[in-house]
Amino acid sequence: MKQENLIDPTSKDLNDPMFEAIWQAIKGWDLSRNGGVGASYAGATGTDVMTVLIPVRETLVAWAVEQWREQVGNRPLQNIYRRELDYVWRKVIRRMGADDVSLIGPRHDELLKELK
């Protein structure tokens, strides 16, 4: 891994239960720092956790967007389950640090306001 690809965790990351779970899993590992013959090894760091956590978050966001499209996207606004499903999937997307509105459009209540 090249040095410029490493991302330091933010204080928000450090308080994320997923960060903590990954940290607990890898904290005792010795990881190669420069690869190849004569590689140096060092213990895991927060940047190593981020190397795992970022693609996990991205994968979960993609999955949540797909679920939103399947479960919410085609329901009529008057459907009794649409508002709650919209809320729940958006909450998952935001929990992973992504912007739900830019990914799946206006929220249910905003769409209802536009109709009035």
Image (spheres, helix red, strand yellow):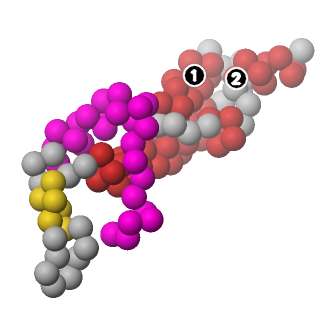
> Between residues 92 and 1, which one lies in front from this camera angle?
1
The answer to whether residue 89 is seen in the rendering is: no
Q: Amino acid at mark 1?
A: Tyr
Q: Earlier in the sequence, mark 1 or mark 2?
A: 1
Report which residue position mark 2 lands on.
108
Q: Report helix, strand or loop for mark 2.
A: helix
Residue 111 seen anywhere in this rendered image of the structure: yes
In-image side of 12 versus 28 (left or right):
right
Kindly check if marks 1 and 2 are in contact, taking CB atoms under 8 A apart as contact. Answer: yes
Q: Secondary structure at mark 1?
A: helix
Residue 62 horizontal/vertical position (percent): 50, 48
Give me the disc on residue 87: 1
- Residue at x-position 42% and y-position 45%: 57
The answer to which of 63 and 8 lies nearer the viewer is: 8
Q: Relative to 76, is 102 above or below?
A: below
Mark 2, other Cα within 10 Å: few <14 / some 14–19 / many ≥20 = some
Which quarter of the rendering shows the N terminus? bottom left
On screen, residue 27 versus residue 17, left or right, reads left
Residue 76 to residue 54: above or below: above
Q: Which residues are magenta?
A: 1-26
Q: Where 42 falls versus 106 (above or below)?
A: below
Pick whichever, 72 or 107, lies toward us.
107
